[in-house]
Amino acid sequence: RFPAEVSIVEVGPRDGLQNEELNIPTENKIEFVDKLSQSGLQRIEVTSFVSAKWVPQLADAKEVMKKISRNPNVRYSTLTPNLKGLNDALDSNTQEIAIFGAASETFTKKNINCTIEQSLKQFDQVVQQANANKLPIRGYVSCVVGCPYEGFIKPKIVGQVVEKMLSMGCYEVSLGDTIGVGNPNTVRDLLTELKRVVSGNMDLLAIHCHDTYGMALVNIVEALESGIRVVDSSTAGLGGCPYASKGGAAVSGNVATEDVLYLLNSLGVRTGVDMNTILAASDIITSVLNRKTNSKVGLALGCKK
Ligand code: HMG
Ligand code: MG
């Protein structure tokens, strides 16, 4: 029923921190990434090369990328919405980039200030340049089951955006349940449609769940049963997109890496990730934020915060 192995993509330093109001000192971000680098994770999304006006918290992206201690077994990636972002990422020795679009027009406008079609044109330029520099490219599609502004999103629409990102040259597309409104039925329907789009090659897809209503783990189980082998998560369950908040509603955190790890460990699914090191990384970042962990597993296993 479950795969022998799953790859976890840690998005805590990027998605986890991007919406925090407190100006987190750069050295603490570096300390957080460095601890995560010791955990056995092979993929860490470190930061974003986006406009500092849009995401002030990540304005120190260059410095963070410069000063982290790189583990040769880890691939360090960054978000790049346009050519400016890509150039900064290249200067910063990024090992993978991610372009990020959505299956909702309104969300796309609010998040990156353009239409879906314009975003895909922009991404195409980024992908061509990244290919010329031999960088692996991940695609994100947000609002895969629901949008804070448009409500339910049809799997067919998601399929169209996924198909375009793959044909552009993304090696993987991560499916974002940006506001955590999915359930096992909507996730299954989505993945049934996408299985057709990827001609059965589910290795081209990853799942990225936010845990607003406590549905992330059941949705991840559903995704694993549908053939997904790559799961995004964020240490301490931090995170959320600043442009996914409607009318000031709280933005929901990502599913916690600790919770995903506990689930996979208990199912006998290998990840290569060490729980204690993730808990130590959680302690670093929750101490800086002066906040309790959002992870149930973190609480049960005695996180300091
Ligand atoms: P814009 O205002 O339309 O663009 O923003 P612009 O070209 O007019 O530029 C505005 C200013 O930003 C200019 O500076 C540019 O130079 C600068 P000014 O002249 O005013 O001083 N600029 C940049 N600076 C640094 N790096 C860049 C860059 N590009 C322009 N790359 C833009 C368009 C895309 C830049 C903006 O909308 C933006 O930065 N958006 C980012 C939003 C974001 O990061 N959202 C969170 C990530 S997505 C997410 O969390 C969802 C995900 O987790 C999956 C899920 O959960 O669903 C991935
Ligand atoms: Mg996200």
Image (cartoon, rainbow, N blue to C red):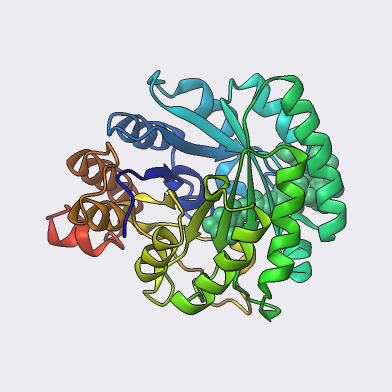
Q: Is residue 146 above or below residue 256?
A: below
Of residue 294 and residue 51, the one placed in the foreground of this image is 294
Asked if residue 114 can be seen in this view, the reply is: no
Looking at the picture, how far across and down is residue 161, in whole percent? 74, 57
Q: Is residue 226 left or right of residue 191?
A: left
Residue at position x 79%, y 63% in the image: 109
Nearest to the observer: residue 199 or residue 303: 199
Depicted 167 relative to depicted 145: above or below: above
Q: Where residue 178 appears, x then y in whole percent? A: 56, 65
Q: Quarter of the image for the N terminus: give it.
A: bottom left
| Left or right position of 172 against 282 | right
> Which percent across, then down, holds residue 278?
26, 43
The quarter of the picture where the C terminus appears is bottom left
Q: Is there any visible trace of residue 195 in the rendered image?
A: yes
Residue at image position (57%, 58%) is 175
Specify the quadrant of the image occupied by residue 89. top right
In percent of the image, x 51 and y 71: which residue is there?
A: 187
Q: Quadrant of residue 247?
A: bottom right
Q: Give the percent coordinates (x, y) of residue 290.
A: 30, 55
Q: Is residue 94 left or right of residue 125?
A: left
